[in-house]
Amino acid sequence: MSITINRKKHRIGLALSGGGFRAAAYHLGVFRKLEELKLLDKIDLLSCVSGGSIAGAFLCANWGQPDVLDRLENYLRTKSIAVSSVVGGLLNPFTSRLDELAKTYDRDLFGKKKMSSLKDGPRLYLNTTNLATGNMFFFVAGGGGKTEMGEHELGQASASKIKISDAVAASSAFPPVFPPLLLESDRFPSDQVNYVTLTDGGVYDNLGVNPLMRVQRNDLQYALVSDGGKPFEISADPTESSTIVLKEAIGILMEQVRGLQFQRLALAHKAGEGPKPMWFSIDSSEGEVNPGDARFASMISTNLTRLSAAEMDVLTRHSGALCQARIEKYAPELIG
């Protein structure tokens, strides 16, 4: 899947941020642009968070199928799952809201496929946050490597029998709407904890760039970062409510992490310890096709609800344009 430049193979990684269905549609635009540039089938690794996990996992679960992008677009245009998942979990005493969410992914996207079924596609990371350790916890498969789950402190275990829908649900389990995924010791054995609980990967890293930086595990020469998350906006009327302050504080903290991760990518590459980074955030107007695309796209909700034709059009157009602009500016050798 690598690309050959000057008779030398180069490997490309693609990080897909969180941000609900808005982010998934934004990433779909990136997939379409990369396909147009004849780069999509050259991607070696996808690292996904939350809404990015929906898009990335569906792409890899249907790798090489000619209609995969059309099917993903149809899903994002026609399905709304958050309300049904929450209500179903509240009314059913034998299941949780997260279980209901996973069931919708099973029914509409993955058809009970397990992580082991991803072996023929690129390396895929579905990232979550481990509430037992505070670390990023990943489910990973494909790319000729092991199918496993784990993190750097607790180690790794086989993830072959984990359903893709469970991993994606854990990655997109936005708190407090969805409870975390519980993995008992029979599924994830550890001599340090009795069990782990996994919540939205965006709590730890909403960009999903960490696997792109693990040079000993993943040897990459290029790193594309598709950021469809919620940028922090200037407010003319900042809150005076003590109950809203916590929500705003979380937004500020996530914005700080976002900026630090971009800086980390740049500094690592400059030091010769990381791939060449190219990132494109949804609020960027540098490269937009139509004036106002960045603002319109940024205003779309990040819920797990179906998107209108106008929303899908601007998200896919905007992300594709930004992706092409960054490649042309920073890595034109990828497209000749």
Image (cartoon, rainbow, N blue to C red):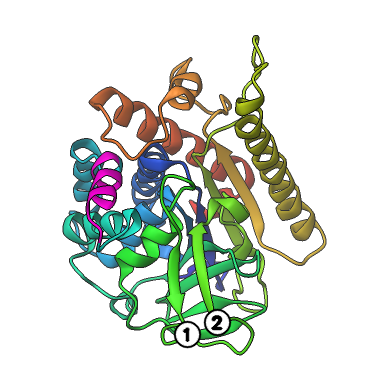
Query: Considering depth in this image, is 9 or 49 the residue closer to the camera?
Result: 49
Q: Which numbered circle lies on residue 5?
A: none
Where 237 falls versus 104 (above or below)?
A: above
Report which quarter residue 25 is drawn in.
top left
Residue 153 located within the stretch drawn in magenta? no
Do residues under tags 1 and 2 come within 8 Å of each other at their CB atoms? yes
Q: Which numbered circle lies on residue 194?
A: 2
Report which quarter residue 254 is drawn in.
top right
Q: Position of residue 104 (x, y in %)?
A: 22, 54
Q: Main secondary structure of the magenta part?
A: helix
Q: Please tell me which residue is depicted at 29% across the width and 48% down the height of the picture.
A: 90
Amino acid type, mark 1 = Ser
- Crowding near the residue tagged with mark 2, few <14, some 14–19, many ≥20 C-alpha atoms within 10 Å: few
Which stretch is magenta?
Answer: 83-93
Residue 92 located within the stretch drawn in magenta? yes
Report which quarter residue 116 is drawn in.
bottom left
Q: Is residue 220 left or right of residue 303?
A: right
Q: Please tell me which residue is depicted at 66% across the width and 28% down the height of the picture.
A: 245
Quadrant showing the N terminus: bottom left
Q: Position of residue 93 (x, y in %)?
A: 25, 58
Query: Considering depth in this image, is 203 or 164 the residue closer to the camera?
Result: 203
Tell me if residue 63 can be seen. no
Where 33 falls versus 189 (above or below)?
A: above
Q: Residue furthest right?
A: 271
Amino acid type, mark 2 = Asn
Q: Secondary structure at mark 1?
A: loop
Tell me if residue 324 can be seen. yes
Q: Position of residue 321 (x, y in %)?
A: 45, 34
Residue bearing mark 1: 185
Where 66 falls versus 18 (above or below)?
A: below
Q: Please tell me which residue is depicted at 30% across the width and 42% down the height of the picture.
A: 82
Q: Position of residue 293 (x, y in %)?
A: 45, 21
